[in-house]
Amino acid sequence: MPFRKAPKNLRDKLPKHAQEIYVKVFNNAYKQYENPKKRRSVKQSLDEIANKTAWAAVKKQYCKDESGKWYRKKTEK
């Protein structure tokens, strides 16, 4: 089910910007893969696919330190 804001467990862990990325990508993936024929794996639920897609987007820009705190990756110019 699409989100208006990040789930509670993510709000406790992720910085605000990472939460926004997660919600936006999750909702887009949810809409895009609503039709099972558009999915690579029919075995996974729509929620699982949208969640994996959203986490992949977050992990492109954020990572965790040794203590488990999420921080934004430095961009190289």
Image (cartoon, rainbow, N blue to C red):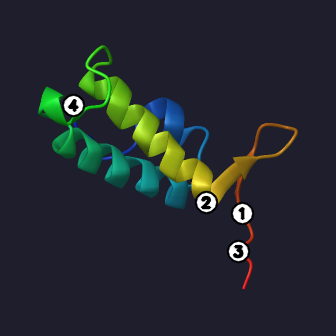
Evaluate if marks 2 and 1 touch, with contact meaning CB atoms under 8 Å apart: yes
Q: What amino acid type is highlighted by mark number 2?
A: Gln
The disc label shown at residue 73, or none = 1
Which residue in the structure is indicated by mark 2?
Answer: 61
Q: Nearer the viewer, residue 15 or 51?
A: 51
Front label number (4 vs 3): 3
Element under disc 4: loop
2 or 3: tag closer to the N-terminus: 2
The reply, left or right, for residue 27 in relation to residue 49 is left
In percent of the image, x 16 and y 27: which residue is there? Answer: 36
Q: What amino acid type is highlighted by mark number 3?
A: Thr
Element under disc 1: loop
| Residue 34 placement (x, y as % from top left) | 15, 34
The part of the image, by quadrant, that contains residue 64 is top right
Mark 1, Cα crowd under 10 Å, few <14 / some 14-19 / many 20+, is: few
Mark 2, Cα crowd under 10 Å, few <14 / some 14-19 / many 20+, is: some
Which residue in the structure is indicated by mark 4?
Answer: 1
Which residue in the structure is indicated by mark 3?
Answer: 75
In percent of the image, x 47 and y 50: which residue is there? Answer: 19
4 or 2: tag closer to the N-terminus: 4
Distance from Cα at disc 2 to Cα at disc 3: 9 Å
Q: What amino acid type is highlighted by mark number 1?
A: Lys
Mark 4, Cα crowd under 10 Å, few <14 / some 14-19 / many 20+, is: few
In percent of the image, x 71 and y 49: which residue is there? Answer: 63
> Which quadrant holds the C terminus?
bottom right
Distance from Cα at disc 4 to Cα at disc 2: 24 Å
